[in-house]
């Protein structure tokens, strides 16, 4: 069984041209062709935390939205949302609090795909290196409390400029930290801020950064993706 996972910081759907264009983001999601997508900055930051991607638009294009939002007009938790391609069953979902000074969070969803239970976590980590490490430890601790151990993928904007150190060391030998490539800033990427981390059950078939005419201007990040098999 193979699934394609992607992570994308959409910057509230505001592109480098300063236009908020949710349809442009949707077009990039279609280009990606992923089965599961972790979005960061999917909701506006203030007020009612209105989603940057209209719920109906996503549902009309065969996306299921993992039920992690605590506000009726949001699709995520502190901007973190998980989209699941229709045909894959959502078994369970929850928002996760992360230790931080500014609002940060993570989201978890359990899926049924190919007769297997699969766990996915999307996250947007802090700008502080120390807090990033604490946040990764918190997520791993929460996963350790889950009753059913299963193949797991963690992905998101890690805000980690180090290619091997920093918060990535927390994963140690128990996880496979993938390096899809440089994804920030989108026009001329120099940093691998966006990451995908997989439990040892998974085999990475292919991975990369999605660079297209649209993605180069739709956000300050490029999407990253990985095709994983069990």
Image: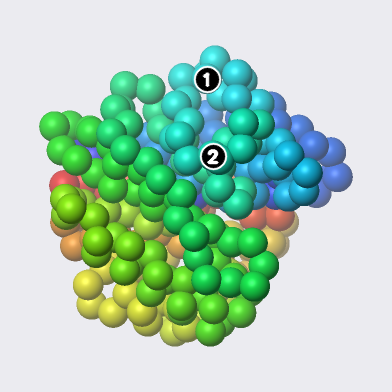
Indicate whether 79 appears above or below 183.
above
Q: Residue furthest top?
A: 60
Of tags 1 and 2, the one toward the viewer is: 2
**Residue 200 position by quadrant:** bottom left
Outermost residue, right side = 18
Q: Which residue is mark 2?
A: 69
The quarter of the picture where residue 165 lies is: bottom left
Along the horizontal axis of the image, is 20 left or right of 41?
A: right
Look at the picture and state if 120 lies above or below 62: below
Q: Residues within 10 Å of mark 2 (few under 14, many from 20)?
A: many
Residue 122 in the image: state x and y as whole percent.
45, 52
Left or right, residue 50 beside residue 30: right
Q: Which mark is residue 50?
A: none
Q: Residue at x 38, y 65 (%)?
A: 139
Q: Residues within 10 Å of mark 1 (few under 14, many from 20)?
A: some
**Residue that label 1 marks:** 59
Helix or strand or loop: what does disc 1 sit on?
Answer: helix
Point out residue 196 in the picture as x, y percentages from the top left corner. 40, 59
Expressed as whole percent of the image width and height from the top left, the position of residue 212 reads 62, 42
Residue under the image location 45 percent in, 34 percent down: 67
Residue at image point 32% right, 54% down? 153
Q: Position of residue 149 (x, y in %)?
A: 16, 54
Residue 112 seen anywhere in this rendered image of the structure: yes
Q: Are marks 1 and 2 in contact (CB under 8 Å)?
A: no
For the N terminus, the quadrant is top left
Task: Identify which residue is drawn at 61% across, 37% down.
Answer: 71
Upstream in the sequence, badge 1 or badge 2? 1
């Amino acid at each position: 069984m193979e699934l394609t996972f992607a992570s994308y910081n959409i910057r509230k759907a505001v592109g480098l041209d300063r236009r908020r264009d949710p349809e442009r983001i949707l077009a990039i999601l279609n280009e990606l062709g992923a089965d599961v997508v972790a979005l960061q900055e999917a909701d506006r930051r203030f007020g009612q935390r209105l989603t940057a991607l209209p719920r109906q638009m996503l549902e009309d294009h065969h996306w299921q939205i993992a039920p992690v939002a605590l506000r009726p007009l949001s699709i995520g938790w502190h901007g973190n949302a998980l989209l699941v391609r229709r045909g894959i069953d959502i078994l369970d979902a929850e928002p996760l609090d992360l230790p931080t000074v500014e609002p940060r969070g993570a989201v978890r969803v359990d899926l049924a795909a190919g007769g297997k239970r699969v766990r996915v976590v999307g996250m947007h980590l802090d700008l502080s290196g120390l807090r990033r490490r604490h946040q990764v430890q918190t997520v791993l601790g929460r996963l350790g409390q889950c009753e059913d151990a299963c193949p797991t993928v963690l992905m998101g904007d890690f805000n980690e400029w180090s290619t091997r150190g920093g918060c990535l060391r927390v994963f140690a030998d128990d996880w496979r930290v993938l390096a899809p490539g440089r994804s920030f800033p989108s026009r001329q990427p120099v940093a691998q801020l966006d990451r995908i981390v997989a439990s040892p059950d998974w085999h990475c078939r292919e991975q990369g950064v999605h660079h297209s005419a649209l993605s180069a201007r739709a956000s300050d990040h490029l999407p990253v993706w990985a095709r994983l098999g069990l």
